[in-house]
Image: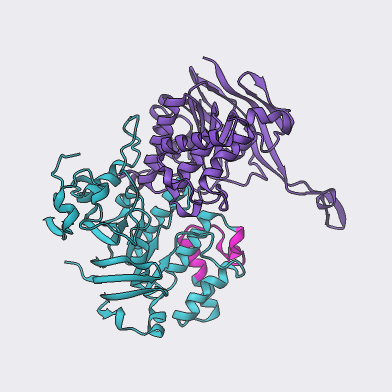
Amino acid sequence: MEKILEVKNLEQRFDLNKGILDKIKFKNGKFIKEERIVNAVNNISFSIDKGKVFSLVGESGCGKSTTARTIIKLIDPKGGNIRFDGKDITNLTGNEMLKYRKKMQMIFQDPYASLNPRQRVLDILTEPMLFHQVVSSKSEAMEKAFEILKKVGIRSEQATRYPHQFSGGQRQRIGIARALAVEPEFIIADEPVSALDVSIQAQILNLMMDLKEEYNFSYLFIAHDLSVVKHISDDLGVMYLGKIVEKGSKKHIFNNPLHPYTKALFSAVPKLSGTNLKNSKNVQGEIPSAINLPSGCYFHERCPYAKPICSKEMPIEKEVEKGHCVLCHQY
Amino acid sequence: MKKKLLQVNNLRTYFHTFKGTVKAVDNISFDIDEGEILGVVGESGGGKSITGFSIIKLIDEPGKIETGEIIFDGQDLMKKSESQMNEIRGKDISMVFQDPMTSLNPVYTIGEQMEEVLILHEKLTKDQRKKRCIELLKAVGISNPESRLKSYPHQFSGGMRQRVVIAIALAANPKLIIADEPTTALDVTIQAQILRLMTNLVKEQGCSLMLITHDLAVVSEIADRINVMYCGKIVETGSSKSIVEKFKHPYTKGLISSIPDLDKDKDRLETIPGIVPNMFNLPKGCNFSPRCKYCKDICKEKEPELVKVDEKHYVACHFPLREGEK
């Protein structure tokens, strides 16, 4: 199977101290150099096959969105490499990236903040088409915009409206339409449904699946809710503190979750039968700060199965069955 | 038979704007027993939050509670003045808001904000107040509470802030807590922690809880009874079990089937087509008729009334679904 995206040993860090002066602190009568670095993404690798959906799941603050932004190079990676469609795009400059930007599009989480409030829907869609020269004239762009709007379920008379005249679900449809406008091959969807009502969530997920089948593009889908990704993904990666702790096919993760964190995520999903929350033992506490990473396995402080070794050594990735990798000392 | 703590009769809250009148809450009646957890479910714009705000009379211009009785613990809140209401708010009825990022004041410490409730509603000395604050923070699961009292909200994560808000809501031992989407802004793991915490606290303290949310799965996990709201009306009400298993209203069915199910493997999710109608221009007859696949002529003409279908289970639909029709 051909790969659309390959990410190897990707790392992303943010330095909280902007200048050298920030780093120098006066403590106990001495000047010392203090570094405060957020380790957002710590050495992750995964790949996405053409026409498949790969989902990254995890709590807020685990580096899912940073991973997405690094892949599309809104932020430059601090280590590792990214190959898109066989070509290394890790060190490309902004100008060189342009032609890849056309092929990779992003759908953002918050439909209220990701659309320019002063642009009409039609302009939101035609601007990227004209910029990337997908179309030759303005009239062609308009025609195409109407066609796309129809696909995502926005009526053509609504095309001249402004974003504030739409509901959250409709705005997310416009966000999707904008991503489609330049005929991408790969779409990064950063929590596209988490700001929406449950009933609207289902509509948007179905729309994304329909479009995928029609255009045959690949998705990197980011979510914090396992039940949402179940229907859309082919493969999954579970992230915790900037590391992928478990990855595998949908079948692996859903039928045979191995990592304690994956299991915890499952037990947190509210279910209609109404017994999941009451009976399950959930993980305690919250995700630790990415500034001072815990020693050993990052999850050991919250892990119900933690052993002494867990706080000392970082486990190595182990392939338990074909294509199903887990990062835990238990296996 | 348990004692009724809150009884709402024919409540109507309208918003009079230049564009017309919005009937945000339109003639609803329900009650909450002592120690009961009532869930209120529906999509955004269904009037759930306005119902909550109406109970503690936090409706601002251009909104107005038109008619209705809100009988809380034997007294009609509609007859209370603003200053009398202030004694009830926070003391007998307290509220947990949706967004933990904005419901705490960023310029006061956690301790100061918790103390405020105690100063207003309880006669305690300074030391007693501090002790009580520490107790409360412990109860909601915040570690080393003494040092945390001096922290500011921005030093807390979303889940911890929501714990603090819950602690404040509990401070004066209220009889009723109204929680307006308390977990919507949180991660699933934290949501599970907060929900479990709230159910335990309600059970321990014996107070009642009105839980407002758009997620039926969340409600079904912890509520005793559920009201399903659509366009300002209660379309179905019943015990959690009978709502989830024997739902009669097509809207409830739609809400249930649009929840992604972890145990089932489907390619597409079922959806309710369309969106909540414009509140300025509600359809004639049943509000749900334009989105309902069972819609018949009468639905577009006559508004259905709530009718009893089972023990404590009422539904407002001309053609309630039969069992097994899933």
Residue closer to the observer: A273 or A82: A82
Residue closer to the observer: A297 or A51: A51
Residue A30 at x, y percent in the picture: 87, 54
* Relative to A308, B291 lies left or right: left
Residue B298 at x, y percent in the picture: 14, 53
By secondary structure, the bulk of the magenta-drawn segment is best described as: helix
Residue A239 at x, y percent in the picture: 54, 35
* Relative to B246, A222 lies left or right: right
Residue B11 at x, y percent in the picture: 26, 71
Return the residue found at the far right.
Answer: A30
Vertical position of residue A287 compared to residue A309: above or below: below
Q: Is residue B28 magenta?
A: no
Query: What residue is drawn where x is 63% and y is 18%?
Result: A86
What is the letter of the purple chain?
A: A
Query: What residue is drawn where x is 31% and y is 79%?
Result: B77
Say whether residue B276 is visible: yes
Q: How is the image coloured?
A: by chain
Vertical position of residue A27 compared to residue A244: above or below: below
* Relative to A30, B200 lies left or right: left
Vertical position of residue A77 compared to residue B55: above or below: above
Say whether residue A299 is visible: no
Query: What residue is drawn where x is 41% and y is 40%?
Result: A204
Q: Is residue B137 magenta?
A: yes
* Relative to A286, A271 lies left or right: left
Image mark count: 0
The quadrant where residue A279 appears: top left
Residue closer to the observer: B303 or B89: B303
Residue closer to the observer: A245 or A100: A100
Return the residue found at the far top.
Answer: A1
Region of the chain picked out in magenta, as a range: B133-155
Q: Colour of chain B?
A: cyan
